[in-house]
Image (cartoon, rainbow, N blue to C red):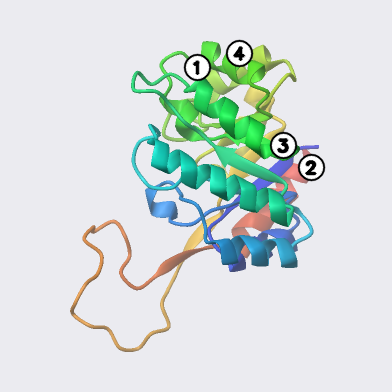
Amino acid sequence: MIITEVCANSLRSAIIAQQCGAQRIELCQNLMVGGTTPSAATIQLCRDKLDIDIFVLLRPRAGDFVYSELEMEIILKNIAFCKKIGVDGIVIGVLQNDGSIDTEKTKAFVAAAGDMNITFHRAFDYVPNPLESLEQLIQLKVNRILTSGQQHTAIEGKALIAKLVMQANDKISILAGSGINIDNVEELIQTTQVKEIHLSAKSLLKSTAKYRSSFLLNNSATIPEHDYFLTDEGKLRRVLELVRKL
């Protein structure tokens, strides 16, 4: 069976993911910057309302994955909170200045997580030696790697993903993600042999606000001022129906 993880950017998206039949969510916020840690209230409410597995993204800010000691404190506090309320897994990723995995900081996360599952997120797509980094993460007892095969989308990175799956040999799970949709999911699974996929299945939800001020809070033309992203039930159901047949 292929496990489908939905990248849920809100409580509402998380509930939609469960209603559609996804096995797991990665809970986050701020998808436009690649995702950051959601609020404690959002994490708690998801735990209260969902029966499926909840993995929480622990990324304290946008930008690179080289973290200061203060940022480490934030991540470790969030790990403790997730552990306390019964979250199933955490999603982390920390690199050194040269792009290699920061093994010491990763060890600290693994130790703090205890029995929670650990996914090393797409910081992996920045490492200069992915096959070597795969072996490091196995040694660090990380459970899975989220990757697009170091390309913009997983289907573009399918060659590397296939290599990672082969080398992993079930010692660590390879979770393929980025740009997965109804048009490419079958090809991706068949060519890479991944057993887990990650997608947001999102659509831009139009704001219901009738008054629009000329003042803009957002400084970027790529970030919507009034509209926001939500998991699209129709998109997700179509992918899940296809995946169940594979």
Q: Quadrant of the N terminus?
A: top right
Q: Which of the two discs, 2 and 4, labels the residue nearer the N terminus?
A: 4
The tag on residue 245 is 2
Up the image or down, 128 lies above or below 214; here it is above
Q: Which residue is mark 4?
A: 135
Q: CA distance from mark 2 to mark 4?
A: 32 Å
What kind of residue is marked 2? Lys
Q: CA distance from mark 4 to mark 3?
A: 21 Å
Up the image or down, 87 lies above or below 197; here it is below
Up the image or down, 14 lies above or below 155; here it is below
What kind of residue is marked 4? Glu
Q: Which residue is mark 1?
A: 130
Secondary element at image label 3 = loop
Q: Which of the two discs, 3 and 2, labels the residue nearer the N terminus?
A: 3
Q: Which of the two discs, 4 and 1, labels the residue nearer the N terminus?
A: 1
Q: Nearer the viewer, mark 3 or mark 2?
A: 3
Q: Which of the two discs, 1 and 3, labels the residue nearer the N terminus?
A: 3
Looking at this view, is 106 or 32 the one in front? 106
Q: CA distance from mark 1 to mark 3?
A: 26 Å
Instruction: Look at the numbered discs 1 and 3 and tell me whether their residues touch, using CB distance below 8 Å.
Output: no
Q: Nearer the viewer, mark 4 or mark 3?
A: 3
Instruction: Look at the numbered discs 3 and 2 and tell me whether their residues touch, using CB distance below 8 Å.
Output: no
Q: Which residue is mark 3?
A: 114
